[in-house]
């Protein structure tokens, strides 16, 4: 989650695409290089299955709740999301991929 936030801050489209699950990966760019958006911070509220990991050997799906703050044209905003990730083997290495998210504030 933190690495994807950093990719948004750095406007690193290739990293975002590479860490997006193939079933939901957008075909169009997700970052507008002309956007005047400024990221201000990330608060990871919880990895929702953290307690259950001790009881399971290797879950292949997990959720992360976070709040990211940003500013557009001087006005502050926040994005509150519960992101879903899936773990898959790629090049023989197990990696986590962003699938989708829900927005509890809506």
Image (tube, grey):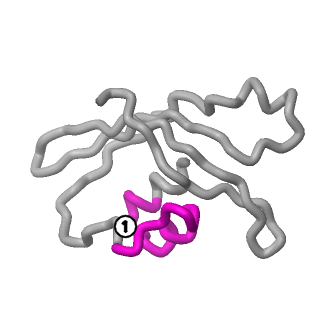
Q: Is residue 10 magenta?
A: yes
Q: Residue at label 1?
A: 11
Could you say where residue 63 lies in the image, as x and y percent from the top left? 59, 38
- Residue 36 lies, with reference to residue 57, above or below; the image says below
Q: Quadrant of the C terminus?
A: top left
Could you say where residue 92 lies in the image, as x and y percent from the top left? 83, 71
Disc 1 element: loop
Q: Is residue 17 magenta?
A: yes
Residue 88 vs residue 76, the one in the foreground: 88
Question: Could one spot residue 50 in this view of the protein?
Answer: yes
- Residue 80 lies, with reference to residue 25, above or below; the image says above
Circle 1: is it few (<14), some (14-19), or many (20+) Cα within 10 Å?
some
Write down the region rendered in magenta: 7-28
Could you say where residue 98 lies in the image, as x and y percent from the top left? 55, 54
Residue 45 vs residue 88, the one in the foreground: 88
Query: Which residue is drawn at the image coordinates 29% and 37% (left, top)?
Result: 78
Could you say where residue 47 lies in the image, as x and y percent from the top left? 62, 33
Query: Which residue is drawn at the image coordinates 34% and 74% (left, top)?
Result: 28
- Quarter-of-image position of residue 34: bottom left
Side of 61 where 4 appears, left or right:
left
Side of 59 where 13 appears, left or right:
left
């Amino acid at each position: 989650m933190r690495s994807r936030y950093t990719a948004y801050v750095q406007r690193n489209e290739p990293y975002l695409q590479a860490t997006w699950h193939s079933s939901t990966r957008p075909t169009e760019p997700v970052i507008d290089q002309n956007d005047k958006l400024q990221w201000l911070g990330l608060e990871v509220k919880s990895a929702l299955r953290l307690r259950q990991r001790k009881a399971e050997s290797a879950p292949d799906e997990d959720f992360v709740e976070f709040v990211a703050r940003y500013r557009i044209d001087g006005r502050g905003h926040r994005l509150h999301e519960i992101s879903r990730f899936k773990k898959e083997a790629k090049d023989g290495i197990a990696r986590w991929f962003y699938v989708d998210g829900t927005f509890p504030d809506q």
